[in-house]
Image (spheres, rainbow, N blue to C red):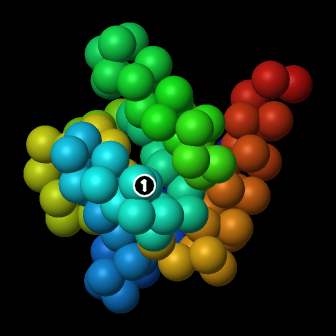
C-alpha cells in the first residue's frame, strides 16, 4: 500500500489550485460541473457521506472514501476539512487509480 503517492498528488493538486475543500464549496462546484473526483474521509458522519454520495451520483461525479481528515488536511494545508474535490481531470484520474489500487490491496 502506497498511501504516500495519493498524499503527494493531493499536495500537488492543492498547490496548483486544482483542489476545493469543504461541504458547501464542494457542493457548489459539483453543481457547476467543475469537480472531477470527490474524496470523502473515512471519519465523516454517515449522514454527510450519504448526502455527498447522492450529490455525486446525481451529477455523474466519481467519489472515493479514503484516509482520515487529519492526515488529508495536513497534506493539503486545509485544516479541519473532510471533503476534498479535485477539479483537474488528469489529477482526478491518477488519484482515483491510486486509491483503487490501495483499496484492492487492502481487500486481499
* Residue at the farthest bottom position: 16
Residue 72 lies left or right of residue 57; in this view the side is left
**Residue 95 lies in quadrant:** bottom right
Residue at image position (69%, 67%) is 93
Whole-percent x, y for residue 90 in the image: 64, 79
Whole-percent x, y for residue 25 in the image: 23, 54
Q: In this rendered view, identify the residue nearer to me: 52 or 104.
A: 52
Q: Give the quadrant of the N terminus.
A: top right
Q: In this rendered view, identify the residue nearer to me: 55 or 77.
A: 55
Q: Is residue 41 above or below residue 60?
A: above
Q: In this rendered view, identify the residue nearer to me: 27 or 85.
A: 27
Residue 87 is at least partly visible in this image: yes
Residue 23 lies left or right of residue 37; in this view the side is left
* Residue at the farthest top position: 46
Residue at image position (51%, 28%) is 54
Residue at image position (74%, 58%) is 97
Residue at image position (78%, 48%) is 101
Q: Give the quadrant of the C terminus.
A: top right
**Residue 34 lies in quadrant:** bottom left
Whole-percent x, y for residue 55 in the image: 47, 36
The residue labelled by disc 1 is: 30
Residue 54 lies left or right of residue 80; in this view the side is right
Residue 8 is at least partly visible in this image: no
Mark 1, Cα crowd under 10 Å, few <14 / some 14-19 / many 20+, is many
**Residue 44 lies in quadrant:** top left
Q: Is residue 108 above or below residue 26?
A: above
Q: Is residue 72 above or below residue 89?
A: above
Residue 25 lies left or right of residue 93; in this view the side is left
* Residue at the farthest left position: 79
Q: Secondary structure at mark 1?
A: helix
Amino acid at each position: 500500500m502506497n498511501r504516500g503517492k495519493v498524499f503527494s498528488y493531493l499536495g500537488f493538486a492543492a498547490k496548483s489550485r486544482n483542489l476545493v475543500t469543504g461541504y458547501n464549496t464542494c457542493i457548489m462546484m459539483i453543481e457547476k460541473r467543475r469537480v472531477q473526483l470527490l474524496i470523502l474521509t473515512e471519519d465523516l458522519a454517515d449522514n454527510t457521506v450519504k448526502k455527498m454520495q447522492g450529490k455525486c451520483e446525481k451529477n455523474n461525479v466519481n467519489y472515493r472514501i479514503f484516509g482520515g481528515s487529519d492526515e488529508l488536511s495536513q497534506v493539503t494545508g486545509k485544516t479541519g476539512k473532510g471533503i476534498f474535490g479535485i477539479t483537474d481531470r488528469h489529477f482526478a484520474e491518477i488519484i482515483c487509480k491510486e486509491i483503487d489500487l490501495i483499496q484492492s490491496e487492502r481487500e486481499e
